[in-house]
Image: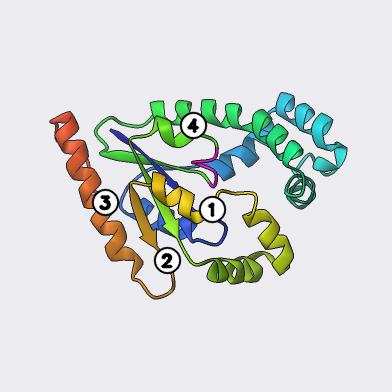
C-alpha cells in the first residue's frame, strides 16, 4: 500500500479534492481534524498549549479556541514553531496508528496536511500531491468561508511556503482555478497510483467502493 501526501495553501480546495478521493474508496487522514481532536482530548497537550499561549487557548468547556490561537501564532513565528513542536509529534504518532489499522489490500491511502512540505512529512511518503490555485482566488474563497479580512488571510498565507517552492517538491499537481476540471485530474492520478501500487505489491488490490 502506497502512502500519499496531499497539501495546498489556504483556499486551494484540498478539502474538496480529498472528498473526491474518498468517494474513490481511498482512506484519508485529515491532519487538521485529528490535531484538533488530540488538542482537546490529550491533557498533556492541552497543558503544554496553555503554557505556551495562555489559558485563553481553551473555552470553559475545554474546547479549543481556534481563532484566539490563530491570532497568536500567525503573527509570531516563535509561537507558531513552538505550537508545531508540541502538536506535530502527537499527530505523527496518531497517523501511524491510523495507518496500521488499514487493510493492506488497499492500493494507497492519503495523508492530508496544510504544512506537508514545511514539516518534512512529505519525505516519509511515496508520492505527494499539491492542490494549486491562484492566490487571488484562494483569498476570496477563504474570505467567503471564514469571514476573515484580506490582511488576516495574507498574513496566514505568508507563514506558509510559496507555491513555487511547493511545486518543485510535488509529484503531482492538481489545478483548482475555477476553470480546469477537477475530476479528470484526480482520476488520472488515481489510475497512476493504482498502477504503481500493483507493480509494487504484485497482488490483487481492493479498489471497489
Q: Mark 1 points at which residue?
A: 162
Element marked by disc 3: helix
Q: Mark 2 points at which residue?
A: 176
Q: Mark 3 points at which residue?
A: 190
- C-beta proximity under 8 Å, tags 2 and 3: no
**Does label 1 or label 3 sit earlier along the sequence?**
1
**Does label 4 or label 2 sit earlier along the sequence?**
4
User: Which dot marks residue 95?
Assistant: 4
- Numbered disc in front, either 4 or 1: 1
Residue neighbourhood size for the residue with mark 2, other residues' Cα within 10 Å, grouped as few (<14), some (14–19), many (≥20):
many
Identified at 68% across, 28% down, the residue is 42
The residue stretch that appears in magenta? 114-118
Gap between marks 4 and 2, in whole Å?
Answer: 27 Å
- Numbered disc in front, either 2 or 3: 2
Asked if residue 115 is among those painted magenta in the image, a careful observer would answer: yes
Gap between marks 4 and 1, in whole Å?
Answer: 26 Å
Q: Answer with left or right where residue 65 lies relative to residue 12.
A: right
Q: Which of 82 and 104 is in front in this view?
A: 82
- Numbered disc in front, either 1 or 2: 1
Is residue 207 in view from this perspective? no
Identified at 66% across, 29% down, the residue is 85
Instruction: Provide residue 24's location: percent of width, then percent of height.
Output: 30, 52
**Does label 3 or label 4 sit earlier along the sequence?**
4
Amino acid at each position: 500500500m502506497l502512502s500519499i501526501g496531499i497539501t495546498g495553501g489556504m483556499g486551494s480546495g484540498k478539502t474538496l479534492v480529498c472528498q473526491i478521493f474518498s468517494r474513490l474508496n481511498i482512506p484519508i487522514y485529515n491532519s487538521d481534524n485529528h490535531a484538533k481532536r488530540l488538542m482537546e482530548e490529550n491533557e498533556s497537550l492541552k497543558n503544554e498549549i496553555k503554557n505556551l499561549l495562555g489559558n485563553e487557548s481553551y473555552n470553559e468547556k475545554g474546547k479549543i479556541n481556534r481563532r484566539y490561537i490563530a491570532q497568536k501564532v500567525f503573527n509570531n513565528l516563535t509561537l507558531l514553531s513552538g505550537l508545531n513542536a508540541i502538536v506535530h509529534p502527537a499527530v505523527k504518532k496518531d497517523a501511524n496508528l491510523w495507518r496500521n489499522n488499514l487493510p493492506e489490500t488497499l492500493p494507497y491511502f492519503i495523508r492530508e496536511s496544510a504544512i506537508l512540505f514545511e514539516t518534512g512529512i512529505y519525505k516519509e511518503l511515496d508520492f505527494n500531491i499539491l492542490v494549486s490555485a491562484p492566490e487571488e482566488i484562494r483569498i476570496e474563497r477563504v474570505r467567503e468561508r471564514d469571514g476573515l479580512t484580506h490582511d488576516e488571510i495574507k498574513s496566514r498565507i505568508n507563514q506558509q511556503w510559496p507555491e513555487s517552492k511547493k511545486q518543485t517538491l510535488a509529484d503531482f499537481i492538481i489545478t483548482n482555478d475555477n476553470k480546469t476540471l477537477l475530476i479528470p485530474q484526480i482520476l488520472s492520478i488515481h489510475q497512476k497510483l493504482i498502477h504503481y501500487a500493483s507493480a509494487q505489491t504484485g497482488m490483487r488490490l481492493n479498489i471497489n467502493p
